[in-house]
Amino acid sequence: MVWELGKDARSGHVITFIMSAALSSGILEIHKAKREKLAWKKVKTINGRDVSTWEFPDILDILGDKILDNSSGKFQSLSRGKMQNSPADLPVRIEFARLWPQQTLQSSQAGTSDLEAVMPTQPRIAETPKTYPLQYNHAVDDNFVSSTLDAFAKHAGQPMFSVDDALQLVTDACKLFEAEGTLQRVDVESVVVVGDLHGQFYDLLYIFETMGMPSETNPYLFNGDFVDRGAHSMEVLFTLLILKLRFPSHVFLNRGNHEAADLNLRYGFAAEIRDHYGFDGRMFFEAVSQMFRWMPLAHVLNSDVFVVHGGLPGPDPRLPFNDAGGGGTGYDAVGFSGRRGGGQHLSLLGYNPDNVSLPPRNTELTLEDIASLPRGGDPATDLRALAELPEEEAEVQRLIVDLLWADPRGKTGYGPSYRVRKGCYIFGPNITEAFLRRNGLRLMIRSHEVKVRGFEWTHPDCITVFSAPNYLGHAGNKGAVIKLSPDETGRLAPSFVSFEAHDAVNARSGR
Ligand SMILES: [Mn+2]
């Protein structure tokens, strides 16, 4: 079955189809008994590109960028969009295959996220002690940084540190993050902001080549999603940690949604740790997971620029997440069609987010509110577990999920996100504006979504930056970084550097 979005079609149709397909596969797992007889759709190609082996989030990543605005199509037009972004090439042609639920179910079970399935449970017997090229003894100087980066570049994919040294390094870095705040305020002359890296180590090296190595005079802020997806999460993570240890007040890291154990088990980082350290990798995995829990969630630069991985706090009050039976399994943010009132339409086979626009929060969140969010845990994306918590506690957890997972959209107000299973929303330009104004801020920078040029002016005062070119080894996008340096008034102003992929093996094989 093929649907084609022609020039006359209202933009937004494609993404609606895709969202409904994603929604379907999600619902399938829960309501299997009810839906066994139905055929389900799976995307085979997009504009002729075979995406049949891609996971839905990846397809959405790519399509969310092609269709410049994934809600109302406001930025999408036959000329340049309002934000001067290039529109997607039309028509977008999407080919669906029909699949029976049983097959879909099996393939989703194959990707089990259980620690036992990824990590070895038994130590190997009679293992000869290995020697490793690098040693870590708490002293990180320029020489250590450069020899580590050299060794990584030459031997990417092989462990360079003993697991004991690796553990020590993570433990030391963790102490630095613990000493920082959930919301970290820093003042800088200038700073390079780097978006998602996703294990693309050689692209990180290229960023350093182009923008200069981090130093006291060249600060960096890495905006989350360092690991998973790409081939060299270990090298990327160690590089960032070593730089943090070398320049604790000039290298900053924000936690991304992929700095979380459950994602690492599914998207490659845990497997990479296993390949490096075997049974001992369990210890290391747990230490890294613990460190991730203490990374700051956001930075404010010069009391002016807000930097966060995903997005802004969701609506207040929140619309409840309902399922067809009202059990709160969280597959939709708004009522199903057939529910009375509200003019909101959501059915099992698709919904039109255009019809949903929740107003800005009754109580706008302050930076102090964000600063007081707890750390030390993983984002609560299990909506059923969340429903068990006292409301106040649940709301705190939802805010953390918003910061790590939410996306902006073109239409004003809040709407349902295709990441609805994480419990988050998409937010419009007026939401960004209200948050920034309430907090005396001028600009927001976020990452989390792939962009053709590596960056995008998503709202008048919100930039998306994504630094993993040719994401997943096949997205064909450029990567970009933002350099913030003082304008004539002395305030931080962005300039952009886009770059092509420099990593021949970006994608972890078989993932
Ligand atoms: Mn992300």
Image: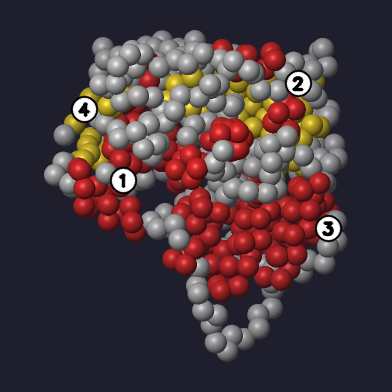
Q: CA distance from mark 4 to mark 2?
A: 45 Å
Residue type (three-letter) at the residue carrying disc 1: Ile
Residue type (three-letter) at the residue carrying disc 3: Val
Q: CA distance from mark 1 to mark 4?
A: 27 Å
Mark toward the viewer: 1 or 4: 1
Residue occupying image coordinates x 55% and y 46% = 258
User: Whole-percent x and y of residue 500?
Assistant: 54, 38
State whether label 4 is within 8 Å of ligand 1.
Answer: no
Q: Which quarter of the image is occupied by the C terminus?
A: bottom left
What residue is shown with label 2? 304
Q: Is residue 345 above or below residue 467?
A: above
What residue is shown with label 4? 3
Report which quarter residue 72 is drawn in. top left
Q: Who is closer to the viewer here, 257 or 507? A: 257
Q: Tell me whether the residue at label 3 lies in contact with that at label 4, contact meaning CB atoms closer than 8 angstroms.
A: no
Residue type (three-letter) at the residue carrying disc 2: Asp
